Amino acid sequence: MQHYAEQPLVDLVRGVSGPEISRDIRTHLSQGCLKCNTAYDGWSRVQRLAAAESTYAPPENLVRLVKLDFRSKHAQEPRKWTLANLVFDSFAQPLPAGVRSGTLNVWQVIYEAEGLAVDLRFGRRSQSREVHMVGQVFDKQAVRALQNNATVELSTAQDHVVATAAVSTLGEFHMEFEATENLFLSVKAAGRNTMRIPLTNPA
C-alpha cells in the first residue's frame, strides 16, 4: 500500500492542501492505513495544541499592569552601592623601628563616600590569622559621628556575609574575622547608598 509523506499530511491538517490531494488523502486514510492514520492523528494533536496556545497567555491588560508596576518599583530603587575612595593608608607611611619590631601589626585606613568618612584600624598578632577591626563612621557635613542606626557588613566578593555589626551612637563598631583576600566592608546608613570598602589584605 502506498503511504503519504509527512508534508502532505501536515498540509491537510493545516487546511492548505488542494481539493484533489485532500480528497485522495482522506480516501487513503479511510481505507485504514495504520502508518498514515498515526501520522495524521499526531499532526492533528500538534495543530490543536498550537491553536489553543493563545488561551494560555495572561490577559493583555494584566500584563500591562505588571509591567507598569515593575517599572515604577525599578525607577524608585537607588543604586545598590557606591565604591569608597581611599584617602589615608598607614601602610604608605614608614613606622619607627621600635614599632615595626612589635608583636602587634596595626593598619589604619580612612575611606570616604556618600558624605561619610570611615576610619578603620586593623590589628593582628604574629602567627595569627584572626583580624581585629575597630572603626568609626563620621558624617562629613555635620562633622560628627554618624548617629542614625547604621550597620556594617563584611562579605566576600561573592556576597557571602562573613560578619555583621551595629554602629553605636558614637559611630563606632568592632569586628573579628579570619584574614582572607578580597573582602568588602559595606556601611549601610538610612537615606544613603551603601558605602562599599574593598579590604584587599586586612592587617
Image (cartoon, helix red, strand yellow):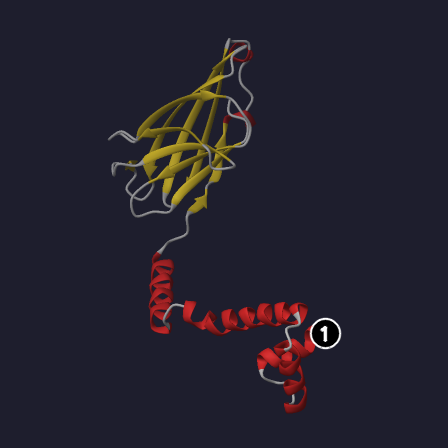
Residue closest to the far front = 31
- Quadrant of the frame with the N terminus: bottom right
Residue 30 pos. (x, y %):
61, 78
Front-lying residue, 88 or 23: 23
Give residue 178's position: percent from left, percent from top.
Answer: 48, 20
* Image-based side of 160 in relation to 22, left or right: left
State the image quarter where residue 173 is shown. Answer: top left
In what element is the residue under mark 1? Answer: loop
Q: Give the residue drawn at x 53%, y 25%.
A: 180
Percent x, y for residue 186? 41, 37
Q: Which residue is mark 1?
A: 5
Amino acid on which the number 1 mark rests in the picture: Ala
Q: With respect to residue 185, does 63 lie above or below?
A: below
13 over 119 or under it: above or below:
below
Residue farthest to the bottom, as pictured: 19
37 to the left or right of 78: right
